Image: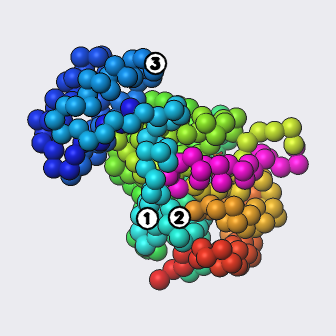
Amino acid sequence: MIIAMQEGCSKAQVGQVISELREFGLQARVIWPSPKAVLGVVDEMSLGRFEEVCDAVRDLPGVEEVYDFTTSWKLVSKGFRSQPTEIRLGECVVGSDEVVIMAGPCAVESRQAYLELARELTPLGVGLLRGGAFKPRTSPYSFRGLGEDGLKIMAEAREVTGLPIVTEVLVPTKVEMVARYADVLQIGTRNMQNFALLEAVGDVDKPVLLKRGMMASIKELLLSAEYILARGNWQVMLCERGIRTFETETRNTLDLSAVPLLKQYTHLPVVVDPSHAAGKRELVPALAAAAVAAGADAVMVEVHQRPEEAISDGRQSLTLEGFRDMMDRVRRVGAALGRPIREAA
Ligand code: PEP
Ligand code: MN
């Protein structure tokens, strides 16, 4: 249930609505404080109960309108906010007409290699640098990242290139620390339903890149995003990165239908990661172009200057030459659709 207050309503009027809802055992959240305050009640309730609460609230002073939602996701839905959510990252805006390219290695492996790659990528049309410092690995014996040292290297790359950085955070206790370095917090596929982590990133004022669980439905992805918005953080990007199917020729199956579907359901921007979907670098440029054609707001890819030496995900990492080829294709598709790729200033 969403309660829209009239423009210029007083704090006391908002307080009265909140305490009336509390009488019903409902906890209202202030979604927007002013000038037109909006309150949200996310508890599930029966239709009878909904009508009862509506009757009690609708005529209170300062209340403009009370809305119901038929979907189980609410704050993320188009019904709640018809305008697309735009997320400003440095010079670019994800969720606008332009398409943003996010690129970098799977993991930050060393200072020298990361800075070298960041410098190479900057003039090629990259809007955001990626890199993993805390790596979720299937095997506990695999390289699990440089930790905070990796974040320092990424922060240095931001200084050098002027590009914002995105990196994954794995546990709620590290959110504050990672947020001190990163411009965007990434929630990986394995953590899409780690609700404590979702709430922790919901409590900070940093954009979040939420990756779809490899076995999660689109509805589950939206409900995970809902956890973050419900805590007050509206800067969420949804990322399709491939799901598990019976097909073994690719690492995962890129579910491109998720792009137009998400665009239909939500105001949040949609990102596509063809690298983790394909698992093979030679497929990445075609899938990236297809993602732009399907309406993605951003594309995130893994790049490595020497993929054969990469400590993780080398097989799917584009070489710099492969990246240039990909950029050429996405530029042409973007131009045809009136969605230019954000280029370096
Ligand atoms: C990543 O982007 O670094 C990553 C680990 O991806 P995913 O969570 O989609 O596997
Ligand atoms: Mn990777």
Q: Which residue is mark 1?
A: 89
Q: Amino acid at mark 3?
A: Ser
Per the image, the residue denoted by label 3 is 46
10 Å neighbourhood of mark 1: few (<14), some, or many (≥20)?
Answer: some
Q: Give 324 or 44, whichever is nearer the viewer.
A: 44
Disc 1 residue type?
Leu
Q: Which of labels 2 and 3 is toward the front?
A: 3
Horizontal side of residue 168 vs 313, given as left or right? left
237 in the magenta segment: no
Q: CA distance from mark 2 to mark 1?
A: 11 Å
- Regarding residue 254, the answer to whether it shows in the image is yes
Q: Is residue 127 above or below residue 167?
A: below
Q: Position of residue 220 (x, y in %)?
A: 60, 34
The image quadrant of residue 216 is top right
Q: Which residue corresponds to mark 2?
A: 129
Helix or strand or loop: what does disc 2 sit on? strand
